[in-house]
RNA sequence: GCGGGUGUAGCUCAGUGGUAGAGCGUCACGUUGCCAACGUGAAUGUCGUGGGUUCAAGUCCCAUCACCCGCUCCA
């Protein structure tokens, strides 16, 4: 097996060579963060999206309450009224203020430097700042810091940051029982610390209203640049005149199209809570630094579900969707230990979110697993925001219980391109014992080409037998016919395309009507009657869990 | 956005300022007839792009773009 570093290079080379993925606008030097799918890639990605739509929308698994799960779909416009993004928080929140240290060149998120502060609890806010603590540490080098944090807070997560801010001074962290955390204003999270005998509470102010600001680099004390704003939404203009009045944005996620259509779907389709709305579509994010092949593209495709339910059932549905989504990846071949579901820590959660699992995959390009999908409990945040900003009622009336409420939302949000990349990486295999070592072990349901038909030689009446078989299969599946060059080369090409089965017509076919079937993964061959080829393929694809396409 | 690296045929890569190269792949023909077989031949190059130095630039200099690695980021 090749080293990790070169495995990704070889996958990238194969994807180019065989027509899975090309760099966008390549003949003009490419464009950073944009990629194209070639003839095999488009089939792979379409199979992924079709599998998702079929398995999640048309025939979702039975729900946790033993009943059928209601799912409907939408397909919304990419450009929406800009007010949508004010309501969703993207207009202001979807921005990362960055500051660089001019000395050591480290980069920090400005909001983290700004918004983290420690307050002495006895005096209640404004009695201490991190800078004052640093001063204290400088004046009393003999003291060590002991941080207490209550279970369930994220103070422990901040130990390394505190340590860094205090210039590597010894910091001990201990979990101790503590009074329940007093809830702060919306957007504020609180944790308690004990440092040098005094109690402090840490405030992370996500509203950005805090005036506490750090001016020196936490790493080296060097001077920091001014805060630079990055907004990750792509601006555009609606109409021929380009001015601020008709500025709009390419959507950074498909979810908002679902939320703003919540009432329309309720009013037109007789759905009752609990139910879900699904959408597959392009989204755009002006990433600061696209990296890792197609993983962080600026234009990408999402497969999103917003599942609306009563808040009292929300955790049940969250757990159910989390498991459904993990099993979906497994069922299509991501069964290896490269698939790593990970619960978000409380610190990572958005302030309105109660739980979120990132379904992560260990790609060859990184030692850290990377996110394929997030299954988030979003509370009633989104519908509440849209109710507030649009002035429209977003509540739901339950006829059975006579309750009126704003539904809680569970959001399984998957990246189609990331899934495609994960399936490509998972399928890639090198077996030096084979004549053609590189092969793509795609799940048959995802394979771009389901089967190939070869006459062993391009004469002696074999093409005349092979072609009708090919034409029969072609009516039902994406299949290929190849009569040129040696049989080994043809098998090798199909291995790199990830084609699970090859049917070869040889001299014996003329005598007894049988053809050989070669299995991609084992190279083993069996003979079956030529009339049974379609049935064989149908059964194999069905065994693999795939509907006939 | 910072630092480092890379950029030559479809892929992987050689190439000392002086004629644009190899292996693999692709295609054709022949031979063979179940695993990238063999033989003969062919096609394929804005040497990433734009400037500059030079009699002469793939090679040296500057800028720029793309990709990779690290930092950073990934609500």
Image (cartoon, rainbow, N blue to C red):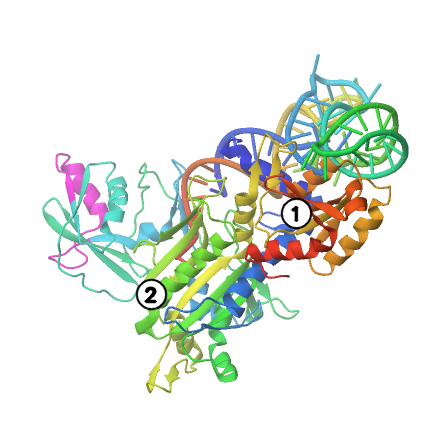
Chain letter, disc 2 residue: A
Residue indicated by mark 1: A501
Residue indicated by mark 2: A352
Question: In the image shown, does A82 or A75 lie closer to the viewer?
Answer: A75
Q: Residue at x 59, y 53 (%)?
A: A446
Q: Splitting the image into 4 quarters, where does residue A9 fall?
A: top right
Image location (x, y in percent) of residue A12 = 60, 40
Q: Is residue A279 visible?
A: yes
Badge 2 local density, few (<14 within 10 Å), some, or many (20+)? Answer: some
Tell whether A129 sits left or right of A267.
Answer: left
Image location (x, y in percent) of residue A503 = 71, 47
Quick check: A187 above or below A111?
A: below
Determine if the magenta segment contains residue A408.
no
Between the C-alphas of marks 1 and 2, the distance is 49 Å
Q: Which residues are magenta?
A: A119-146
Q: Are marks 1 and 2 on the same chain?
A: yes
Q: Splitting the image into 4 quarters, where does residue A346 fall?
A: bottom left
N-term mark: 1 or 2: 2
Q: Nearer the viewer, mark 1 or mark 2?
A: 1
Quick check: A22 above or below A69?
A: above
Q: Residue at x 40, y 67 (%)?
A: A410
């Amino acid at each position: 097996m090749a080293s990790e570093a070169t495995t990704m290079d070889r996958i990238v080379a194969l994807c180019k060579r065989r027509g899975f993925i090309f760099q966008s606008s390549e003949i003009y030097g490419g464009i950073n963060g944009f990629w194209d799918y070639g003839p095999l890639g488009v089939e792979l990605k379409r199979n992924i999206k079709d599998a998702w739509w079929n398995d999640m929308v048309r025939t979702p698994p039975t729900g946790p309450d033993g009943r059928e799960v209601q799912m409907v779909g939408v397909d919304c416009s990419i450009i929406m009224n800009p007010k949508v993004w004010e309501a969703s928080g993207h207009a202001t929140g979807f921005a990362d203020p960055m500051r660089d240290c001019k000395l050591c060149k480290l980069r920090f998120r400005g909001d983290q430097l700004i918004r983290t502060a420690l307050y002495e609890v006895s005096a209640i806010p404004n009695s201490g700042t991190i800078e004052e603590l640093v001063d204290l540490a400088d004046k009393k080098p003999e003291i060590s810091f002991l941080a207490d944090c209550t279970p369930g807070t994220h103070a422990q997560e901040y130990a390394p940051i505190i340590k860094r801010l205090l210039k590597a001074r010894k910091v001990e962290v201990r979990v101790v029982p503590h009074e329940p955390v007093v809830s702060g204003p919306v957007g504020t999270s609180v944790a308690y610390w004990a440092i040098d005998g005094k109690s402090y509470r840490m405030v992370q102010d996500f509203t950005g209203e805090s005036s506490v600001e750090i001016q020196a680099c936490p790493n080296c004390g060097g001077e920091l640049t001014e805060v630079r704003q990055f907004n990750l939404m792509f601006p555009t203009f609606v109409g021929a005149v380009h001015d601020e009045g008709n500025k709009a944005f390419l959507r950074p996620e498909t979810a908002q199209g679902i939320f703003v259509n919540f009432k329309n779907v309720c009013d037109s389709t007789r759905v009752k809570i609990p139910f879900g709305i699904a959408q597959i579509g392009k989204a755009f994010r002006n990433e600061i630094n696209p990296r890792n092949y197609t993983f962080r593209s600026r234009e990408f495709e999402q497969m999103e579900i917003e599942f609306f339910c009563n808040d009292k059932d929300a955790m049940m549905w969250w757990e159910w969707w989390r498991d459904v989504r993990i099993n979906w990846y497994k069922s299509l071949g991501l069964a290896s230990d490269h698939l790593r579901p990970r619960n978000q820590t409380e610190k990572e959660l958005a302030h309105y979110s109660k739980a979120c699992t990132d379904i992560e995959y260990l790609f060859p390009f990184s030692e850290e697993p990377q996110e394929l999908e997030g299954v988030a409990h979003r509370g009633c945040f989104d519908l509440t925001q849209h109710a507030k900003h649009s002035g429209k009622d977003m509540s739901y009336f339950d006829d059975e219980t006579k309750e009126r409420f704003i539904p809680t939302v569970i959001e399984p949000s998957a990246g189609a391109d990331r899934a495609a990349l994960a399936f490509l990486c998972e399928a890639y295999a090198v077996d030096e014992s084979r004549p053609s070592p590189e092969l793509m072990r795609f799940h048959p349901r995802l394979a771009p080409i389901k089967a190939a038909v070869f006459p062993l030689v391009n004469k002696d009446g074999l093409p005349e037998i092979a072609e009708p078989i090919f034409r029969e299969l072609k009516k039902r599946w994406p299949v290929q016919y190849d009569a040129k060059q040696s049989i080994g080369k043809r098998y090798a090409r199909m291995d790199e395309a990830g084609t699970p089965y090859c049917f070869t017509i040889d001299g014996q076919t003329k005598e007894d009507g049988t053809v050989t079937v070669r299995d991609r993964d084992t190279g083993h061959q069996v003979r079956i009657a030529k009339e049974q080829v379609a049935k064989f393929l149908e059964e194999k694809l069905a065994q693999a869990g795939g509907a006939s396409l």
